[in-house]
Image (cartoon, helix red, strand yellow):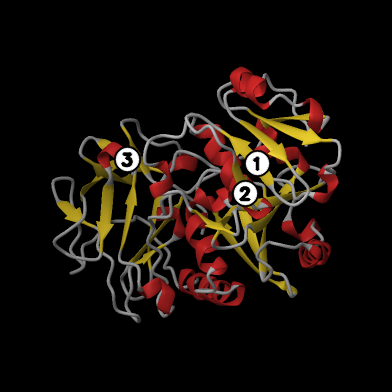
Amino acid sequence: MASTRNSQSTNVVVVYVPEYVHLSSINQCIQDRNAIFVSVRKQSLDIDAARRQHGRIVVLERDHFVFYIDPYPDPFRCCYQSRNLVMTDLRYLHPFPPMFFNYWPLVLRDGLWSANQPPRLFFVNTNDRDYIQSSSADAHTIVEYYAASDDAAADSLLDFDRFASIARKKTACVMHFFVVKVGHAFIAVDTNNAASRYTFSAAIKHRVVRDLSTKTESVQSLAAASRRLQARRAEMLPQPGFQLRDSDGRVLDENDSFRLRIIRHPSRTVIISDANANADGNAAVDAGNSDAHERLCATSFGPARKKTVIHGSAAEGAVFRAKTINGIVYLALDNDYVTIPQRQTDDLTTSPRIPDKDQRIQIHYDKSGYIMLSRWNDC
């Protein structure tokens, strides 16, 4: 839990560890990599001097922790299960803005600030220690680091039973599942049955972690929905001389504009895969017969200042065109091309340049005539 980062950095939080506190007894947090841990004798700790030097500080105690931040003169006492949430806020918000506590996700119980739910347990490769939260799904967590040959180690090489054993020994965290980060993918694992797993991308991480935490979904139900989606993918037809057609089967030419529409009928669905999901969780994954997926009706992609929407309604959503260049059909929006620019996420965005092969969108027809969007050659 040590860091050598400069304490004057605006994104580094100084954490004081009194002589009677043992770090080994405290759950690690993802935000610990952005902190400097300082061992100190409690009687010699000058809180006022430390605040003047560092701005905001954390002091660990045996059964809770305390933080100080401007413009508040008094300390805030917090439950350890909320430590990563608090450390995240301390990193990015200094001083706390006016009205902050109107939307702070913690409540005061028995004199301690605490979250309504316990944190989720993430397992992260030691070679991926720079991993930090990309959404609120990572903020309310504790972390265990595992050793592997590299960050892209295949999940078949990981000992999920050992991870489950570690998870069952944890206290003050969500007990029925945990998440393992493997390369750019995430695997949700049933704590009581490590063979029950569901692999998902960062694009839908917020929704998956939220639904598993609240038991809206289970690892088993998500895995079953994924298998149904894969079965639908298996019905995709060969596409020599691909031509984009509308819902009536008419071939679209370069001058035609169109909307992509999600059909809300469980047996006749335009499947929008998680490749169309937004990293903030505002995604649509309509996989057919799953009740959870049926609740979703639209998907959007960035940049945020110009959000583009594929909608469930025929009258809503962005207007696209098809451009054929060297025999390849590209989805175009205004003068830009729809693309998936980063390998580590599945976020759709637009670019003025023609996408490289590994950044292209691939369009598939299934046997019913509806389409699926994916990353090029990923299906």
Helix, strand, or loop for circle 2? strand
Give me the residue at 78% from left, 68% from top.
Answer: 168
Helix, strand, or loop for circle 3? helix
- Image label count: 3
Q: Residues within 10 Å of mark 1 (few under 14, many from 20)?
A: many
Residue 246 appears at what percent x and percent y?
21, 63
Work out whether residue 124 or residue 260 is closer to the camera in this orientation and state it: 124
In the picture, the quarter occupied by the N terminus is top right
Against 94, residue 367 (above or below) is: below
Amino acid type at mark 1: Val
Which label lies toward us, 2 or 3? 2
User: Is the residue under label 3 in contact with that under label 1 (CB below 8 Å)?
Assistant: no
Give me the residue at 34% from left, 80% from top.
Answer: 266
User: Is the residue under label 1 in contact with that under label 2 (CB below 8 Å)?
Assistant: yes
Q: Is residue 364 visible?
A: yes
Q: Residues within 10 Å of mark 3 (few under 14, many from 20)?
A: few
Q: Residues within 10 Å of mark 2 (few under 14, many from 20)?
A: many
* Upstream in sequence: badge 1 or badge 3: 1
Q: Name the residue tied to disc 1.
A: 66
Which label lies toward us, 1 or 3? 1
Residue 21, quarter of the rendered image: top right
Work out whether residue 261 or residue 277 is closer to the camera in this orientation and state it: 277
Amino acid type at mark 2: Cys
- Compute the Cα span from label 2 to label 1: 6 Å
- Compute the Cα span from label 1 to label 3: 36 Å
- Compute the Cα span from label 2 to label 3: 34 Å
Q: Name the residue tied to disc 3.
A: 304
Work out whether residue 13 or residue 227 is closer to the camera in this orientation and state it: 13
Residue 159, quarter of the rendered image: bottom right
Disc marking residue 78: 2
* Upstream in sequence: badge 2 or badge 3: 2
Residue 22 appears at what percent x and percent y?
85, 43
